[in-house]
Amino acid sequence: MAGIFKAYDIRGIYGKDLTDEIAYRIGRAFVKFLGCRKVVVGRDMRTHSDAIFAALTRGLTEQGADVVDLGLCSTPMSYFADGRLQADGSIMITASHNPAEWNGFKMCREEAIPLSGPTGIQEIEKIVASGEFGEPASRRGEVTRHDIVSEYVEHVRSFAELKRPLRVAVDYANAMGIYEGKVLEGLVEIDPLFDELDGSFPNHEPNPLKLETFRWLQEKVRGGGYDFGIAFDGDADRVGFVDEKGEIIPMDAITALIARMILQKEKGPILYDLRSSWAVREVIEENGGTPLMSRVGHAFIKQQMREKKAIFAGELSGHYYFRENYYAESSSLAAIHVANLVSASDRPLSELVRPVRRYFASGEINSEVADAAAVLNRLKEHYRDGRIIELDGLTVEYADWWFNVRPSNTEPLVRLNLEARTRDLMERKRDEVLALIRG
């Protein structure tokens, strides 16, 4: 059991770290912690998700909670169900993009408010370890089925405003994008890749953060005749895009494009994670919005969105958060906004993206370090003449370049993101900062 309780979810290798018995105990602990009476539970297509569902549900119902079984669904659908069905909490059985032998839980309280380490996961771990579930429930909870897929599809499709027919290639990665992508069916012409559910992921890892996983989508789009391409991750709470030439679009550039579309109809706060290009902040300002920098991590972003009543948020990892989905991710709604944008223009997506690709980024570079705190202190001292921001790790801004260095939550690593106004300056400063990190 050790190690499966993470900062944002519970995740481990099935049968080794995460067993049916542990899933049962987590079910009981979840109800004990939240005092919930109605829990929605969805699951992905992994071969052991059904077994985990049965064990988890046994724990939930023995502790007195009623379970609404969503069946197979995407993670954004489970968030939607949590709010729409006025549940006291939700659990999505998934290990996202992890390999086939992994599984886990993404957990929320009411209104799809996520449980993170400090806001519940650590307490649930303690209850699981101690076995102190309290007095037996006076009644066992009941299990009912609910088709949330059709409701979610109808809800998200209501934001489509396509001005002309589009042809789109979609890489479903044999995973839950097959369900999330139902939103697009009939709105655009879809040419699918890997559109059969298979929890062994026979074609490639469902992780659009790894650029090599775009290869098949790029090849298809470069064959010609597509307006753009879409790639979902394993549980479809993240999404990546390629333009009509098959070129990968940086995820923060998508944030800027969606922000521009949304701000045409409504002004308000929009969040961007602090690793994002300066261009994101600039586009939000240019279109009358209020840009707000956020920490990395969905729990922080969702909390800040609620506090600031933000309309939308984008994260460099391909999570796109919408007020209309209870401040949670909706990959298909992100795709709808991109489709609306392309269909309303006589220019291709590559040209629509070009104005927001204003600077030169290093990409995220990991370095193994013995003492992350010492590294951050060294950088802070060396760059003390810059604008220092300590929202998440260390960010330093100058007039023509900036960088952020963040420690990993799980590994002895620090992660560098750096951007500059010219490629030469980016490369020089990248090497300079890396030398200080690794020196």
Image: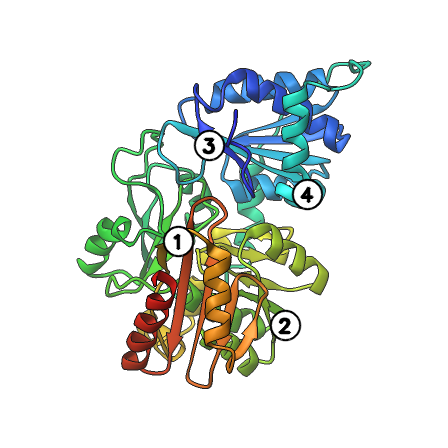
The quadrant of the picture occupied by the C terminus is bottom left
Q: Amino acid at mark 4?
A: Thr
Q: Nearer the viewer, residue 356 or 369?
A: 369
Q: Amino acid at mark 3?
A: Asp
| Crowdedness near tag 4: few (<14), some (14–19) or many (≥20) residues, C-alpha within 10 Å | few
Residue under pointer 2: 266
Which of the two discs, 2 and 3, labels the residue nearer the N terminus? 3
Q: Are the residues flagged by discs 2 and 3 in contact, CB closer than 8 Å?
A: no
Between the residue at mark 4 and the residue at mark 1, the CA separation in whole angstroms equals 29 Å
3 or 1: mark nearer the eye: 1
Which of the two discs, 4 and 1, labels the residue nearer the N terminus? 4
The vertical placement of 329 against 292, above or below, is above
Residue 364 drawn at (x, y percent): 37, 61
Q: Amino acid at mark 1?
A: Val
Question: Which quarter of the figure has residue 159?
Answer: bottom right
- The label on residue 119 is 4
* Left or right: residue 29 compared with residue 317: right
4 or 3: mark nearer the eye: 4
4 or 2: mark nearer the eye: 4
Q: Amino acid at mark 2?
A: Glu
Which of the two discs, 4 and 2, labels the residue nearer the N terminus? 4
Between the residue at mark 2 and the residue at mark 3, the CA separation in whole angstroms equals 35 Å
Residue 119 drawn at (x, y percent): 68, 43
- The label on residue 369 is 1
Q: Which residue appears at 46% of the width and 69% of the height?
A: 379
Q: Are the residues flagged by discs 4 and 2 in contact, CB closer than 8 Å?
A: no
Q: Are the residues flagged by discs 3 and 1 in contact, CB closer than 8 Å?
A: no
